[in-house]
Amino acid sequence: MGTVPPVTEEAGTPSLVFVREYGFPGNGDGQFYLPQDVYVSVMGDISTGLGNIFVCDTGNNRIERFDDNGSFSYQFGRFGADPGKFNSPVGIAVDFNYYIYAVDQENSRIQKLDIRGNPVASWGAYGSGSGQLMNPRGIALDTFGNIYVADAGNDRIQKFDSSGYPIGSYGGFGRGNGFFDNPQDVAVDRDKNLYVADTNNNLVQKLDELGRPLLSFGSTGNNNGEFYRPGGITVDDHYVYVSDSGNNRIEIFSRQGKFLSANGKKGVGPGDLNNPTGISVGRTGELYVADTNNHRIQKFKVVINR
Amino acid sequence: MWRIPIITASKNSKLSSIDRRVLIPLLILTVLFALNNIAAAFDAPSPESSPLLIKGSRIFTFISRSLEGSKEGYLPGNFRDESLRLTIAGKVSDTDINANFFETSSMGSTQISSNEEKISILLKRGSTEAYFGDFTANLDDTEFSKLDKVLSGIKLEGDYGRVSFKALASTPQGESKEIRMYGDGTQGPYYLGFKTVIDSERVYLNGALQKRGSDYDIDYDAGTVTFKNRTIQKTEIINVYYDYRTTTYQHSTYALRATALPRPELKLGLSFIDDSDQLNNAQNIYASASNESPRSHYILGADGRIDLGDLLTGKGEIAYSEINPDLLLANQPKQVGKAGNIELSSKLGPITIGSRYKRIGPAFESASTALPKQDLLDQGVSLTYLPNDIFSASGDYGYARFTQDGVRFENISRSGKLAVTPTRLPSLGYLFDEYEQSNDPIPPYAPVSRLITKNYYSLNHNLGKFIFSARTGQETWLDRSPSRESTIYRTNDLGLSTSGFENFATSLNLELKDSEFPGDQRSTTKTINYDLSATPSSQYSAFGSFNYTEDSRDGITNVTDLAYKASPLKIFNTDGKLTISSLKESFGITNESVIKDSGSFKLEFRPLPALRARYYFKPNFTVLSRTQMITYNNETHQYDINLIPLNNLVLGASTIRSLSFAADKTDLPDYRRRGQSLDGISSTYSIKAAPWNFMSIEFDQIVNDARGSSLITTSTPEAYQGNNSLAREFDGSIRTSLSERFAIDLAYSNKITKSGTTDSANDQADTQLLTGSFKGIFNPNDSWSFSLLYSFSKSVDFTLSPVQETYFSAPGAGFIYRYFDRLRVEGDYTFSRAVSGPIQDKSFLSLRGKYDLSDFIHVSLRYDREISSNPDYKTTDISGYVEINL
């Protein structure tokens, strides 16, 4: 998930190298309980220049912020339905104006907050109508501040303007050709193309900005280029990174859908994954993964093998 | 390592945005040149280089909206929005560049104009780095020559092994400050010391971040924080980080720090800081707006560190500060201050002896956050005994004397620690801490003879993949004068957590706290936190979280989360989550303890790849604990089924039933009476088919039916007014592509809306709207496309007598012209007229054009004109959009 997609190095075969991990099980500062999304903001803190990694600490109903060195900065949110509170925050994105957009899944809404977690606006309600949400999960922003939400329960991607007004809806139940089955995440590239983790179809679908299908890739399985319940997706100028949740790995593709590499295996050690979900790529080629069932965030470096 | 300085230029920054746009490339080029020269002196140049990647966009948007007459919801006015985004990245002459600039400005006749800029620039060549824009000056490795302000300007850093330097020149935007204080047994206000920059504060209570509005309020002008929910006890620590401004004069900061390692065991450093106001226009500012005088402030510092192994290690620092408090006056006496410190440590076998001495003269002033303690003498000794890896003991004695806010303090501290850490056995620890105070540390710093004594015992045991921890202790605050009284806090903590299990993780924390206050007042708090997650297989997982707090003063609060996922069969899966929370809730007149249950549950059945059936249940109700009555309910049941019987056919049906009610909150004391209720059903049936390649068909039937009641008479017997609403809508559409050149779309819609103030009446609304439309599209070639539109609608209002039927006829036409991918021009015109009843005409003309001058420049224009009679109005919208990409 991301706002303005960052830049990685020019073409080559990318792979991931483990850098560090954040957190362990618990509810203290810097600890996580089933985190489902991570977002690395293009810009850091206004006052200090640090702190641009945001984590949806889903099980603790809060958002935690870390600086570039992995040190805990602060947290906000707790269980509830009032503005600024969460009931299973599962998706997050931050725009250029330092506004945070959080998918508040069980409250069936999107919350817009300032950088310190003060509520600014919220929209959405349970249902299938325009602007309504059912089990929403991933969220992404394009360069103009439009918001795309993976409305998984309604098998669609909904598009909102930055104030939350619904301005489009793509998909519906089905397989391929712009139809989805429980899509868990969405990403937007610099050309405003959408990449959808079409989870139950074990596909990634690429749509243009009007929602017309361009291509799809993947199939069910655990071989290279295959998926089992992909739960997260992000994109930069060259590559599409897919959190292949059921296979406990991160797969990297070209933006044209060509398989490039698969990274990770199930486990608890450094670089191992256990139901990875949300995923975010930073502007200097660092990849953050919500390693959900290991209750941690892992940071990888995208290395280009020429 | 790349460090990204992140910057936001303030609106009152010295450089205008235009200046910045011009200066950024110039700055980059200038510093590239400088870096080449500086770094070349230390680094062997590398032949590596790559082209500079410059990306960005400039977007200009305008909207002009005018209105003659009156149209509901229409907002006339002029709006303008500009944004610029620029990224420069790559490597030039061995220098890595990563620069980002973003600017946006908005202006409108009905909105406040806003402007925002963000800049970050980093240049790096070898071991030399240059930052531009705003950054935190991190000259932080000394105590007296420290500089940690948020600055705007240039910073250079170089680290060449035995020699390193940092240099900066800047104009600060504000100054950062941290204040740390104890609670005083009240909610506040707690005084921060300065006017606070809006939105800059971060308030922590005992290390936990507080939220403005819900946890505390802040008065930015007065610089005070007041907690909203509870009093802050004397043992609790409040930390506030914030920015403030102190001077109205043009201000600049220059700093240079250099370090050298002449020998491996010796490090020397030298620092110079000039943090002064400028005399530009200072006379006028002083005369017109300020009681403050412009001042200069210089600091010169030297520091060193020596490491002779076990025999001796030490570090020391001396600093000299000079302040001219009024640059406008000649021969103004300067304020000269001195400070120094030294720490020495020596290891003699298992014994380590340490000593420290610090003296800050009364006139010394740091360039960083103002030192809260002036005229300080702080000295002490420490002793550590470490005979082996199992046993350790240490003790410390300290004496401090200082002035704070004009009050003289004298404190003595004594502490000791014992630790036994045997292998494979529990490790034990003991902490003793005693602190004598001459004054209360909370303003107004009343004289007091206070002795604070802490005794804590701890046990930690690592049992493979389990970690067990326990801690117990007592803290006593004994005030011996002016009156003798004591406060005792007893704390017991137990913790257990796992780590390293692939399929299981849990953590448990239990805290019991017992407090005795003067006057035989007591309070107890029990807190339990428990998290559990288990994933025995890929088919099953369960999660639970429990937070419980029982406070003898504030009552019980808790939140319990239970969640699961299960896929016992390939064709069946289910997941759910239930949250139970217990809290106090306002019922308008009374505050009540309530239990809230909310959650979601899903069952999904997929007997065939082409068939999916689902059931969702979302409960959400509130129980009044005192009566065990449900006072609020809002539950939703959803059933849906999707079937793909043929490759090109999708059938769907979905029904959502919503049940809700709420108690009448005037029904004291038990709130048993129902205030309002609603029972609604929403059903959607859809068919999507593509029987042939040239045709797609979609039919949707939507039915929303709701019935409810509202309390209208509270006296016995209560009376309720019923209400109902019904909306039935059928939509059908057929899209065809009869040939590459010719397409026809047909659509039909029939919508019936009824609502009434009783269960059965339709006295509020009873209407029908039938609409049929046709659209023919003809593409004579790849450049041109023409369309003809026609729609006919019938609107019936059954609530009027006689029943009113209105027919609308709306023909229209449109065209699209494309010139390759560069140019696209579109136009539509529709005219609708009521063919019965009163005259109602409406015409709508829309022209849209988009021109891509190149791959990098895009222009878009739009003109919309709407003319209506009955109601009478005319609107004209003109909007434009220019995007220039690099």
Image (tube, grey):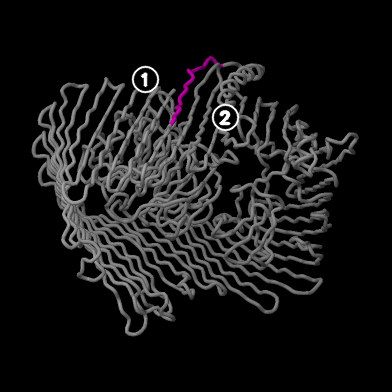
Q: Which mark is residue A225?
A: none
Circle 1 SS class? loop
Name the subunit of mark 1. Answer: B
For marks 1 and 2, the one nearer the N-term is 2
Camera-side residue: B504 or B789?
B789
Residue at screen point 58% across, 73% down: B524
Direction front: furthest residue: B838
Q: Which mark is residue B17?
A: 2
Q: Given the image, on which type of amino acid does mark 2 rest? A: Ser
Residue B861's spot in the image, x, y percent? 35, 29
Majority SS type along the magenta span? strand
Circle 2 SS class? helix
Name the subunit of mark 2. Answer: B
Q: In which image quadrant can residue B21 be found? A: top right
Direction bottom: furthest residue: B716
Q: Locate the C terminus of chain B and report the quarter of the image it occupies.
A: top left
User: Start and end of the magenta stretch?
Assistant: B46-60
Q: Which mark is residue B853?
A: 1
Residue B843's spot in the image, x, y percent? 25, 39
Q: In which image quadrant can residue A277 be found? A: top left
- Seen in the picture, residue B289 relative to B574 is either above or below; the reply is above
Magenta-span inclusion, residue B50:
yes
Camera-side residue: B554 or B733?
B733
Q: Locate the N terminus of chain B and report the quarter of the image it occupies.
A: top right
Q: Is residue B700 visible?
A: no
Callout 1 crowding tier (Cα within 10 Å): few <14, some 14–19, many ≥20: few
Residue at screen point 57% across, 63% down: B470
Residue B124's spot in the image, x, y percent? 58, 25
Residue B742's spot in the image, x, y percent? 12, 29
- Seen in the picture, residue B131 relative to B424 is either above or below; the reply is above
In the shown orientation, is residue A217 left or right of residue A270?
A: left
Q: Given the image, on which type of amino acid does mark 1 rest? A: Leu
